[in-house]
Amino acid sequence: MYRASRFCALLVGLSLGVDAFAAALPEAIGLVRAVDGLAVFSSRGHEAPAQVGQALVVGATLSTAAGSLGLALVDGTRLVLGPHSRLQLETFRFAPAAGELAFRARLQRGSLYAHGGELARLGKGAWRIETAGGEVSLDGEAAVLVRAGR
């Protein structure tokens, strides 16, 4: 009986710990859909090769060498990071019912092809890519090619 109650207490403690741990993880805002060549995913102080199916989170930085990286965000936005590029995902909010629509990313170098999804269609001015030379806004389901640096 004593063992059973200790075991139950351990299970409850572990489940609470898992819930607390899961709450601390950032919410996925999309997925890596394609990797061509070497691409690196950096988040929360860790760096690893980008892999198809890997979750994207706010605060992550994606870098490519000679290849490219295809990304899909939860609102249907499609992004392709070109060769020798670096993109930091800064903000993503997609809650249309609550009126919360925002996407901000910083293209530090290279090129980025973007095809807008629901966020760009619903939120005028809510979708922005910043570069050292300025800012690009995407409204509607249009597509845009952004270049930064050399």
Image: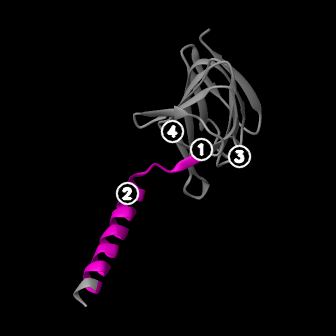
Measured Cα–Cα span from mark 4 to mark 2: 22 Å
Q: At label 4, which amino acid type do we have?
A: Thr
The dot on residue 21 is 2
Taking the view exactly as shown, the residue that stands out farthest to the bottom is: 1
Quadrant containing the N terminus is: bottom left
Assess disc 2: are there few (<14), some (14-19) or many (≥20) residues with their C-alpha within 10 Å of its C-alpha: few
**Residue that numbered label 1 is attached to:** 54
Residue 91, given in percent of the width and then of the height, sits at 51, 38
In the displayed structure, 54 sits above or below 90; it is below
Residue range corresponding to the magenta coloring: 4-30
Q: Which mark is first along the chain, 3 or 2?
A: 2
**Residue that numbered label 4 is attached to:** 91
Q: Residue at x 61, y 45 (%)?
A: 30
Q: Which mark is first along the chain, 1 or 4?
A: 1
Q: Residue at x 29, y 73 (%)?
A: 10
Measured Cα–Cα span from mark 2 to mark 1: 19 Å
Measured Cα–Cα span from mark 2 to mark 3: 28 Å
Measured Cα–Cα span from mark 4 to mark 3: 16 Å
Q: Residue at x 35, y 60 (%)?
A: 20
Taking the view exactly as shown, the residue that stands out farthest to the top is: 150
Q: Nearer the viewer, residue 59 or 83?
A: 83
SS class of the residue under badge 4?
strand
Q: Is residue 81 visible?
A: no
Q: Which mark is first along the chain, 3 or 4?
A: 3
SS class of the residue under badge 2?
helix
Asked if the residues shown at circle 2 and circle 1 are in contact, with their CB atoms under 8 angstroms apart, the answer is: no
**Residue that numbered label 3 is attached to:** 76
Q: Which mark is first along the chain, 1 or 2?
A: 2
